[in-house]
Image: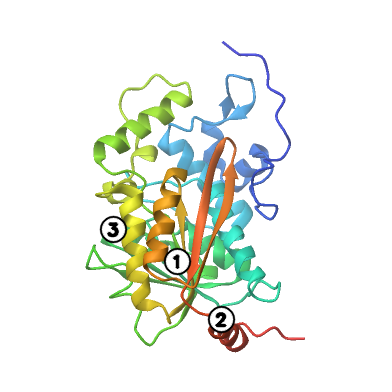
Amino acid sequence: MIQKKKELPIEKPKLHPRNKNRERYDFRQLIESNPELAAFVKPNLYNDESIDFANPDAVKALNKAILKYHYTIENWDVPEGYLCPPIPGRADYIHHIADFIGRNNYGKIPVGGHFKCFDLGIGASCIYPIVGVMEYGWSFIGSDIDPVAIDSANRIIAENETLQGMVECKLQNSPKDFFYGIIRKDQQVDLTICNPPFHASAEEAQAGTLRKIHNLHLDQKEPVLNFGGQSHELWCEGGEERFVRNMILQSRKFAQNCFCFSTLISKESNLKKVYHVLEQAEVFGAETIPMGQGNKKSRIVAWTFLNTEEQKLWKNTRWKVKS
């Protein structure tokens, strides 16, 4: 039964102002970009055009259309069973952290391939590098513990000329390591980004999936693939809290290699513990950057070990603002 039509805003006001996904989906234009999307677009409960977000094929078709229409990515896919991420939220991370870097660079966001970003856990979708390359021209190193994910990301890069030479993918052979084996001790990267596993167990991840399905008003008892993902994408021992704790402690060993480390923090309740670990690690400075998509709130935590003079030297040698 069609419910009373909601008055929906033309834009999603909580998304970053530069986010290309800020406006409501224009399915006519998206279908022109990816005709296979047409089969999945139907009126929802409120008689608005939408897709079934619990259908992995529909979500994949939507992502292909968005990436082609907004980011000129002609060929994109992920293997069956791998996470098909929501592009608006991923783009928001890139834009918000770009603003943060700009605030710390005399008000100017560095652009171009000389700005190198490390995506810790690039995944099969390669979404963060796609947005970073297309929006700011940044170059990327992407790591993952899953060879299938690395192969998938490399295939996306190889099949899209705009990404070639801009993204380097590296397999992390030691699942407990975050930076060792990927970043050389003599190498400098300007920024580290990360979307850590959210849950602490497979059972918790499955329960989260069922909650999403329930919130979409669907009657399904088994998780579907676009929500399921691979185990390492959704959960790890200790969940987000332990993952970020280990990341922070290991980042100290690479204090002089990176201007700014950052990670997404989905659970606000983890912030206090995260800042306690940052204090233990003796960072020079840290900041929480709020984000919001719809009714969901999240945040980025960014930190650096470089003192004021070291930051100034880094900016003036790697990001020098030209008059």
How far is disc 1 from disc 3 in space, using C-alphas?
Answer: 14 Å
Q: Give the mark nearer the N terminus: 2 vs 1.
A: 1
- Position above or below: 58 against 277: above
Q: CA distance from mark 3 to mark 2?
A: 37 Å
Q: Nearer the viewer, residue 314 or 41?
A: 314
Residue 257 is drawn in which quadrant?
bottom left
Q: Earlier in the sequence, mark 3 or mark 2?
A: 3
Q: Residue furthest top?
A: 1
Residue 88, position as x, y percentages in the image: 57, 48
- Residue under pointer 1: 157
Please state the horizontal and vertical placement of residue 205, each as a whole percent of the image: 31, 38
Eyeballing the image, is 160 above or below 298? below
In this view, which residue lies farthest toward the right? 323
Tag 1: amino acid: Ile
Residue at 48% x, 57% y is 127
The residue located at (57%, 56%) in the rendering is 289
Answer with mark 1 or mark 3, whichever residue precedes in sequence.
Answer: 3
Badge 2 element: helix
Q: Amino acid at mark 3?
A: Val
Q: Amino acid at mark 2?
A: Gln
Where is residue 227 drawn, in percent x and y? 38, 38
Residue placed under numbered mark 2 in the picture? 311
Q: Nearer the viewer, mark 3 or mark 2?
A: 2
Residue 250 spot, x, y in % from top left: 32, 69
Name the residue beneath numbered marker 3.
148
Callouts 2 and 1 close, C-beta under 8 Å: no
Q: Secondary structure at mark 3?
A: helix
In the rendered image, the quadrant that contains the C terminus is bottom right
Q: Is residue 82 visible?
A: yes
Q: Residues within 10 Å of mark 1 (few under 14, many from 20)?
A: many
From the viewer's side, name the closer residue of 210 and 278: 278
Q: Is residue 16 left or right of residue 318?
A: right
